[in-house]
Amino acid sequence: MYDTLREKYDRRVQAGEIHADPGQLAVLEPLETVRRAVEEAAGEKRGFSLFRKKAAPIKGLYLWGGVGRGKSMLMDFFFENVAIPEKRRVHFHAFMQDIHTRLHHVRQSGAADALKPVAEEVAKDARLLCFDEMQVTDITDAMIVGRLFGLLFENGVTVVTTSNRVPEDLYKDGLQRDRFLPFIALLQERLNVHHLASPTDYRQNRLSGAEVYFAPADASARQAMQDIWEDFTGGEGGPLTLRVKGRDVVIPQFKNGVGRATFWDLCSNALGPGDYLEIANTVRVLILEDIPTLGRNNFNEAKRFVTLIDALYEAKVRFICSAAAIPEMLYVEGTGAFEFERTASRLREMQDADWGRES
């Protein structure tokens, strides 16, 4: 017997795994429509005939809404319940990084048009592409996504994606945005746009009243950080590589908008404001471990940490960390100690239970 997504969702509610949410319930029907169409198309392909007409393209879904509303959970739920093998679920940044790697290899072979064979290769492996957190901030990505997705759609790929932005706001204020606008039109043509208007911010609720700054960074703090990571992600996740002006910026662990790294991962390398802005635009929660005491011995790392906190603060990213000392005692002497007082104040403000809550 064929169980619908609504029936499966209701069973999870009855089992106490999730709470019924009106915004999420409204998305189940459009997701079910895509699921059935993709599965039926896969069945027709297996029964291929020379005389059968080419199948009509399947409209995908563009699911947007505020952070913490359950978009990624619904994407996981949908993906797990689509009964075809040719499917792929990936963060949009990671997908574009993969595309650039493939393009590089194809260009080395001397191909005049590298994008076409790359799109065909992706389409051969995945009839359904599920993207988490679609956003475009890099001009290199912005200049190729229109034709890339046009080729994917021509090759029969169905796309389901989540985003924090409506399609019209993608690559907002970006360089040469007029060249990007056809991609927005293509998304609106090939994907049904649905607003996940949940009244509840589940991600925020997980942290309301919870401790988010652990000092000192001892075994107890490490366990607390691990517990938080498992609560957000189920303990899963993998590295995410962001491409910033030709450089790779790596978040060692990432899943569903939650990033996890050590202080040294993000502050010991020669990263600049643009790199930290990209991190802040990508993660909605950052778990940062092992912040040391700061001073003249690690002055460059301390400056990068200040820049990172500024970027996270301005982007309203939820920040969870373990540190050698309380904020006011992290940087007590040496050049930059006075300037660090603002960072310490921000670290205190970011511990508030309402920090990052959307108005």
Image (cartoon, helix red, strand yellow):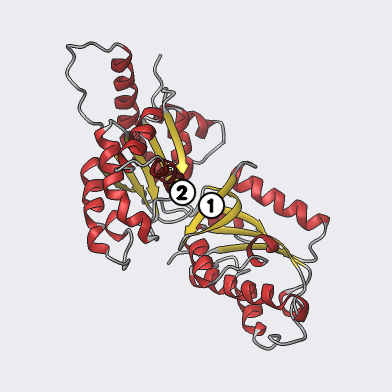
Residue annotated with mark 1: 241
Relative to 214, is 113 above or below?
above
Relative to 316, is 306 above or below?
below
The answer to which of 128 and 225 lies nearer the viewer is 128
Q: Is residue 91 left or right of residue 226?
A: left
Q: Residue at x 28, y 30 (%)?
A: 156
Q: Residue at x 48, y 47 (%)?
A: 94
The answer to which of 98 and 22 lies nearer the viewer is 98
Residue annotated with mark 2: 97
Q: Position of residue 206 (x, y in %)?
A: 59, 53
- Specify few, some or many for label 2: CA neighbours under 10 Å numbering under 14, 14-19, or 20 or more: some
- Helix, strand or loop at label 1? It is strand
Q: Identify residue type, mark 2.
A: Gln
Q: Position of residue 355 (x, y in %)?
A: 55, 67
Q: Is residue 91 left or right of residue 297?
A: left
Q: Does residue 211 appear in this view?
A: no
Q: Is residue 207 left or right of residue 69?
A: right
Where residue 129 is drawn, which disc sits there? none
The answer to which of 286 and 107 lies nearer the viewer is 107
The C terminus lies in quadrant = bottom left
Q: Position of residue 127 (x, y in %)?
A: 36, 29
Sequence-wise, the earlier of marks 1 and 2 is: 2
The answer to whether the residue labelled 1 contacts the one labelled 2, judged by CB atoms less than 8 Å apart, is yes
- Helix, strand or loop at label 2? It is helix
Residue, far front: 110
The N terminus lies in quadrant = top left
Q: Quadrant of residue 126?
A: top left
- Specify few, some or many for label 1: CA neighbours under 10 Å numbering under 14, 14-19, or 20 or more: many
Q: Identify residue type, mark 1.
A: Thr
Q: Residue at x 36, y 39 (%)?
A: 160
Q: Quadrant of residue 135?
A: bottom left
| Disc 1 to disc 2, C-alpha distance | 7 Å
